[in-house]
Image: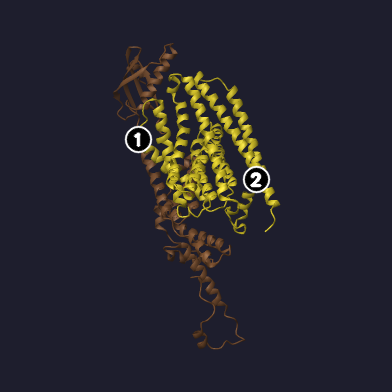
Chain colours: A yellow, B brown
Amino acid sequence: MDDAFVRSAALVAAVLPPFIIVTYFLVGARVRFDADMVWAGFGFGACAAFPAIVTAKLLEAAMGYGNGYIEVAANQAFFGAAIPEECCKLVALLALCWRQVRELQPNHLFALSITLAGGFACLENIFYVVGDGNWHATAALRSVSAVPGHAFIGAVVGFCIVRALRVSFGVFWWGLALVLPVALHGAYNFFLNALVNPEVQHAHAAHDLIQLFVALFILTVILEGLVAHLSLHTILKMTGNGERQAQDIATTPSLVRWIHSIGEHPLWWAALSAICFLVAAGLLLDSSVGPAQGDSLSLEIDRSLGQGFSAFAALHGAAFIGLTIVLRRRIRSRRSDPPL
Amino acid sequence: MTGKPTEPSESESEGTPPRDQSAPPEAPENGREAETSDEDLFRLFVGPNAEKFLRIYRAQKEKKHATSFNWVVLFASLPWFFYRKLYVVGACILLLPIILIVIFPNLSGVSTTGIAVALALLANSLYVQIAQRRIKKVKALNLPPAERDQRIRKAGGTSPAGAVFGALILVSMVAVFFIDKATARLPDCHNAQVQNLAKTILTGILSENGVDAEALAVSDFKAVESAEDGTRHLCSFSADLESENSTMFLSVTWKDSAAGEFEVIVGPTQDSVSQ
C-alpha cells in the first residue's frame, strides 16, 4: 500500500469507528462534546498504548509462550494484551481526573472512561488497519468487534469507578474496575487466539472445540455490549435529569455546537443503523457463499466467525435504532417542557 | 486578590485635595485596576512559576510578540504539556507525527530536532494564549468572584500526575525502540513457537500422506548448527508416532526480520531443510 491516498482512506476507515462509538456513548450518557476532559481523555487513551506495548513485551519475555494452544492462547490473551492494556488505561484515567474524580457527575466520569478507551482503540486500529493489504475488510471487522469491545470495557470501568465512589465496599468496586475488564478482554482475545492457532485444528474433537470457541467468542462480545448498556442505563438513573453536565452555550464555539447538534440528531443514527444492517447482510452473504479456500476446518472457522461478525453488525444497527428512538423522545420532552 | 477597593478610606479622603469639577474623570486608574485584576487571575490560573509567563502575558495583552525558550520542552515536551494540563496539545504532539508517518512512511527518517526546537520556542506563548482563552471562558459565566476564582484555579494549575504519566509515555516510547532492537533475534530450537510449528508442519505432512497423526509427539529438540550472523538455525528433534521413533530436522530462517516473521522447514535429513 504505497499510495498515500489509499493510506489516507485506510486511516479514515480506522479512525471513524472509534469516533462513532465514543459519540454514541456521549450522546447516550447526555454528555456534551465539549465537556471537560472528554477529548483530553481520548488523547490520553491513545497515549496509553505505548506503556501498554512495553508492558506486554516485558511480560511476554518473562512468561514466554508456553506449550500447547491453550497455554499459548491464554498467555498471549492475558499477559500479552488484557493485563497490560487494561492496567495502563486505568492508570491513564486516574492520572487525568484523580483530583476531580469525586466532583465529576456520574455520567461525565462514565463518559470519560469510554472516551479514553475509544482513544486507545483508535490508535490500535490505526496500527492494525493502515498498512494491511486487506485494510477495508480489517477495518470493517474491527469496527464491529475490537473497537466497540474496547468502548464496552471502558463503560464497565467507568461504571465500577462511579460505584466505588458512591457506595460502601468501595475497595470491592475498585478491584472490580481492574479485574472485570481484564477478564472480559482476556476472554475475547483467548478465544480468538485459540481459533487461529494451527494446533487447535489437530486437537482432539477439533470440530466441536472450534464450534465452542466461536460460540464463546461471540457470546463474550455480546455480553460486553449488554453489560455496557446496562451500566449506561444505571449511570443515567444515578445522574438524574437535573444533574446533566452543564456547559454554558454562550461559551461554546459554534463549530462544536454544530457538531453536537448533528450528534444528537436522530436522523444521523438512523442512517448509521441502516449502514450497519447493510454491513451485516454483506458479512452474512460473504460467510455463506464465500470461496472454498483452505481445509474444511479453517473454512468452518472463517464461516462461523463471519456469521458472528454479521450478528455484531446487526446488533450495532439495533443499538443505533434504539438511540434514534431515545433522541426523538428527548426532543419531544424538551418541546413539551415549559420554558424557564 | 481581585483588585483594590474603589472607595477611598476616610484618612485618604481627608488628605486628598478637593476635586476640580471641570477636570476630566480619572479613567486610567480604573483601567489599571481592571488590568491588575486580569493579571491576578492569570497568576491564579498559572499557579507555580507564574512570573516566568507574565512577560509574555503582558506582551500579548499589548498585542506585541514575545517568546521565551523553554528548556524543559526541548527535552521532555510531553511531560511538560501534561504537567501544565495542556492534554489535548500534548496528545497531538505525540500522535500527529505517528499518523503522518503511517500515511507517509518515508517521513520516518526525518530529523525531529527542528520540531523540538520549534516547540521549545512556542510552548510558553502557546500556554499563555490557552490560559487567556480558558480564563475568558470562565469569566463569561459571570460567576460570583469566589466561585470564579475557584474555577480558574481548577482549570489551570499543574498536574504532577499528568507529568508522571507523560514521562512514562516518553520512557515507554524509547523502551519500545530498544526492546524491538534487542528482541529482533531469530527464535532458536528451544523456542516454544518453533517447536509448535515443527509439530504442526510434520502433522500436516503426515496427514497429506494419509497417516493419522493425532498421536504425534515431538521432543528432544537440539541445536545442530547456527549461522554466525544468527540468521539461520538448524535443529534436530525426535518424532514419536505409535511407538515409531524418528529423528527429524528443522531449519529456522528469517522471512521478514523487520516484521519479526520467520519460517520453519521440516525434513527427514539435514540437506532437505538446507536452503
Query: Residue A327 — which label?
Result: 2
- Residue count near mark 2 (Cα–Cα under 10 Å), binned few <14, some 14–19, many ≥20: some
Question: In this rendering, is residue A142 above or below A252?
Answer: above
Q: Is residue A266 left or right of residue B145?
A: right
Q: Separation of disc 2 and disc 1 at Cα?
A: 49 Å
- Residue count near mark 1 (Cα–Cα under 10 Å), binned few <14, some 14–19, many ≥20: few
Question: Residue A63: image x %, image y %?
Answer: 35, 34
Amino acid, disc 2: Leu
Q: Quadrant of residue A230?
A: top right
Question: In this rendering, is residue B113 above or below B245?
Answer: below
Give the quarter of the figure containing the C terminus of chain A.
bottom right
Question: In this rendering, is residue A133 above or below B177?
Answer: above
Q: Is residue B260 left or right of residue A212?
A: left
What is the chain letter for disc 1?
A: A
Judged from the image, the secondary structure of the residue bearing numbered disc 2 is: helix
Question: Residue A332: image x %, image y %?
Answer: 69, 48
Question: Residue A4: image x %, image y %?
Answer: 54, 39
Amino acid, disc 1: Ala
Question: Which residue is the site of mark 1?
Answer: A61
Query: Residue A44 — which label?
Result: none
Judged from the image, the secondary structure of the residue bearing numbered disc 1 is: helix
Closer to the camera: disc 2 or disc 1? 2
Q: Residue at x 54, y 40 (%)?
A: A228
Determine if residue A22 is in view: no
Q: Nearer the viewer, residue B197 or B98?
A: B197
Give the mark count: 2
Question: Residue B56: image x %, image y %?
Answer: 48, 64
Q: Nearer the viewer, residue B38 or B229?
A: B38
Q: Nearer the viewer, residue A228 or A247?
A: A228
Determine if residue A154 is in view: yes
